[in-house]
C-alpha cells in the first residue's frame, strides 16, 4: 500500500512540473507535447518536435523507368519521373536508421521486381537520432510531410488515395499512422513490429491504429515479456495483427530476458555489431519476413488464435469461411482479420522462411518387448527426394507406452506439397533414471494431418522390430 502511495506522489510531482508546449510549422500544422502526446503514464516525457529543416526529410523516388536510380523529390512539388496512375509504396525506417540501409534497398528492389509501381523511400535519419523521446516527437512532423507529398500528388490528378501503401518499420510504422490520419481513404499501412515504448496502451491518436487507412496490417515480432526487454508493441493495433512465432523471441535470436546480458558480453569482447544484433534481432525479424513474403505470394498462411500457447498446442488449425490470410506483402483485407498466428524459420536463413503446420498422431506399437520410452523425439519429412527441417515432436515431456496414442503440433520448413516418407529420431533421456526406458522405440503407425491442406496421411514402418534410433515410415 505504501509503495502505491509513493508511486502516486512521484507521478503527481512529475506531472505538476511538466511544461506543456506548442509549436507550429507553416503548412504542416501545430504540434504539442501535452496529453496525450506527453505528461501521461505511458509518456512521462514529451518533447516538441524539431523543425522540418533540422529533421531534413528526403524523399527518394524509384521505379522501373528510372532503372533503379532515384529522383530526389519534395513534398511541395511533383517529379516528372513519377508514374501517374500507378500504385505507390512508401518505405519508412525507424529509430537511429536511414534510407540507405541494406534492408531498405532489398525491399525496394523486391517490390520493383514484382510490380510496376512507384517506390518512395523516406529518409529522416537526422530526426531519428537520440534521444528516443525526440525521435518519437519528430515522427509527427515526418508523418505530416508524407501526407503533404501524397496530397500534392492527388491534387495534380496523378493518383488516388487508395493507391498508396505505407510500409513503416518500428517507429516508422507510427510515422505512417500520422500520415494516414491526415489522408482520407489512404489505401494501406503495413506496420513492421511497430515501436512499443511510448506507444503501448496510448490514445489511438498517438499511435498507428485501424482508422489511419482503409487496411492496416501489422507484423509483431518483439513485444516485451513479463521479465524481458522488447522493442515492439504487443497490443493489436491493425485490422489484422500477425503474431509471428508468438510475436516475440524469434528463432536464433537471444530471448528477451537474456539479450541485455548477451549484448554486454559482446561489447566486452569488442564485438559492437554483434551486440547490436543481439539487442534488436527479434525486432528486425519483421523486416526480413516481410521481404521474403514479396516473392512468396502463397506462403505465410496465418490462423486465427488467441495466444501462442493455443497455437503451439494445435488448437488453432482452421480459418473462417473468408479464408486464411497471409502475412506480409500480399495480406488481404478480404480474408481473416483479427489476431492471427504463424511460425517461421529464423531470418538468418535468408529465404523461404515460412513453416507449414502439422498435427502428428504417434500410435505406439503393442509389442510386449517394449516397456516405455522417454526422451527427445524428432521428425523429418522427405518430399520429392529432399528432406525438410528437423523438428522436435516431444522433448522429454511424454512417457510413451505400448499402444499409447500421443499427439503433437509441429511447424516444419522446406516441405513440398506431398510427403513421401517420414523419419522419426529417438534419443533416450540421459540421467540417473535412463535405465527405466527403452533405448529404441517403435510406432505401429503415424498419422499426419496437414493444417494447410486439411488432409490426413498415414505412414507405417516396414521394420516391425525397431533396431535403430532412426525409423523410416512410408505411406500405407
Image (cartoon, grey):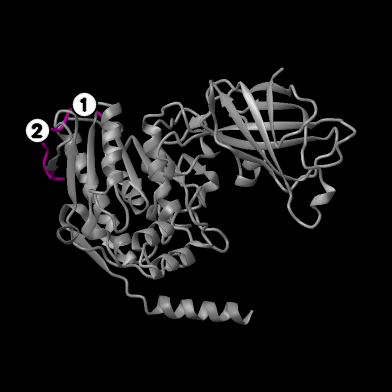
Question: Residue 152: x percent and y percent?
Answer: 17, 39
Does residue 468 appear to the left or right of 155 in the view shown?
A: right
Decide whether the magenta segment is chiefly helix, strand or loop.
loop
> Which residue: 16% across, 45% down?
75
Between circles 2 and 1, the one closer to the viewer is: 2
Density class for disc 1 (Cα within 10 Å; few <14, some 14-19, many ≥20) is few
Visible residue check, residue 315? no
Residue 85: mark = 1
Dot 2 lies on which element?
Answer: loop
Residue 476, horizontal then vertical, whole percent: 72, 17
Q: Is residue 391 above or below residue 3?
A: above
Residue 217 picture quarter: top left
Q: Nearer the viewer, residue 190 or 425?
A: 425
Residue 283 in the figure: left or right of residue 366: left
Taking the spot 27% from the left edge, 60% from the top edge, the residue there is 31
Label ID, residue 267 = none
Residue 424 visible in image: yes
Q: Measuring from the top left, give residue 34's x and y in whole percent.
A: 35, 66
Image quarter for residue 313? Answer: top right
Indicate the secondary structure of the residue bearing disc 1. Answer: loop
Residue with the most extreme left position: 80
- Which residues, given as a range, are shown in magenta? 73-87
Vertical position of residue 460 compared to residue 103: above or below: above
**From what the image shows, is residue 132 above or below residue 10?**
above
Q: CA distance from mark 2 to mark 1?
A: 13 Å
Q: Is residue 182 left or right of residue 13?
A: left
Residue, disc 2: 80
Residue 279 screen position, x and y as percent:
42, 59
Residue at screen point 38% across, 41% down: 190
Amino acid at each position: 500500500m505504501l509503495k502505491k502511495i509513493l508511486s502516486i506522489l512521484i507521478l503527481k510531482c512529475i506531472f505538476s512540473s511538466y511544461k506543456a508546449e506548442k509549436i507550429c510549422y507553416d503548412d504542416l500544422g501545430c504540434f504539442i507535447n501535452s496529453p496525450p502526446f506527453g505528461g501521461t503514464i505511458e509518456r512521462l516525457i514529451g518533447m516538441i518536435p524539431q523543425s522540418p529543416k533540422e529533421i531534413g526529410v528526403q524523399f527518394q523516388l524509384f521505379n522501373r523507368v528510372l532503372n533503379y536510380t532515384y529522383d530526389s523529390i519534395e513534398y511541395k512539388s511533383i517529379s516528372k519521373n513519377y508514374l501517374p496512375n500507378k500504385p505507390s509504396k512508401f518505405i519508412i525506417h525507424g529509430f537511429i536508421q536511414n534510407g540507405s540501409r541494406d534492408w531498405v534497398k532489398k525491399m525496394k528492389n523486391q517490390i520493383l521486381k514484382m510490380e510496376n509501381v512507384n517506390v518512395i523511400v523516406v529518409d529522416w535519419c537526422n530526426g531519428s537520432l537520440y534521444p528516443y523521446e525526440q525521435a518519437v516527437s519528430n515522427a509527427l512532423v515526418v508523418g505530416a510531410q508524407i501526407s503533404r507529398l501524397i496530397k500534392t500528388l492527388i491534387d495534380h490528378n496523378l493518383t488516388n488515395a487508395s493507391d498508396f501503401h505505407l510500409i513503416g518499420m518500428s517507429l516508422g510504422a507510427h510515422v505512417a499512422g500520422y500520415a494516414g490520419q491526415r489522408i482520407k481513404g489512404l489505401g494501406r499501412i503495413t506496420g513492421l513490429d511497430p515501436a512499443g515504448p511510448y506507444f503501448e496502451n496510448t490514445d489511438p491518436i498517438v499511435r498507428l491504429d485501424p482508422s489511419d487507412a482503409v487496411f492496416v496490417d501489422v507484423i509483431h515480432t518483439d513485444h516485451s515479456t513479463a521479465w524481458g526487454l522488447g522493442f515492439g508493441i504487443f497490443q493489436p493495433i491493425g485490422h489484422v495483427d500477425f503474431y509471428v512465432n508468438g510475436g516475440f523471441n524469434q528463432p536464433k535470436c537471444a530471448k528477451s530476458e537474456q539479450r541485455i546480458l548477451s549484448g554486454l558480453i559482446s561489447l566486452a569482447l569488442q564485438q559492437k555489431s554483434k551486440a547490436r544484433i543481439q539487442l534488436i534481432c527479434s525486432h528486425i525479424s519483421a523486416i526480413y519476413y516481410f521481404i521474403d513474403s514479396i516473392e512468396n505470394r502463397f506462403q505465410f498462411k496465418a490462423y486465427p488464435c488467441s495466444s501462442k500457447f493455443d497455437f503451439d498446442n494445435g488448437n488453432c488449425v482452421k480459418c473462417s469461411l473468408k479464408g486464411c490470410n497471409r502475412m506480409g506483402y500480399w495480406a488481404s483485407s478480404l480474408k481473416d482479420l483479427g489476431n492471427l498466428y504463424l511460425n517461421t524459420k529464423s531470418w538468418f536463413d535468408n529465404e523461404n522462411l515460412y513453416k507449414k503446420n502439422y498435427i502428428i498422431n504417434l500410435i505406439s506399437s503393442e509389442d510386449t518387448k517394449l516397456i516405455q520410452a522417454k526422451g527427445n523425439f524428432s521428425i523429418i519429412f522427405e518430399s520429392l527426394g529432399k528432406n525438410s527441417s528437423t523438428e522436435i515432436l516431444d522433448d522429454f515431456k511424454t512417457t510413451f507406452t505400448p499402444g499409447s496414442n500421443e499427439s503433437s503440433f509441429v511447424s516444419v520448413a522446406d516441405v513440398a506439397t506431398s510427403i513421401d516418407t517420414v523419419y522419426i529420431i529417438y534419443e533416450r533421456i540421459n540421467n540417473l533414471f535412463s535405465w527405466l526406458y527403452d533405448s529404441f522405440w517403435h510406432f505401429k503407425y503415424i498419422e499426419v494431418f496437414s493444417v494447410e491442406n486439411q488432409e490426413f496421411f498415414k505412414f507405417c514402418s516396414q521394420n516391425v522390430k525397431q533396431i535403430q534410433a532412426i525409423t523410416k515410415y512410408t505411406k500405407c
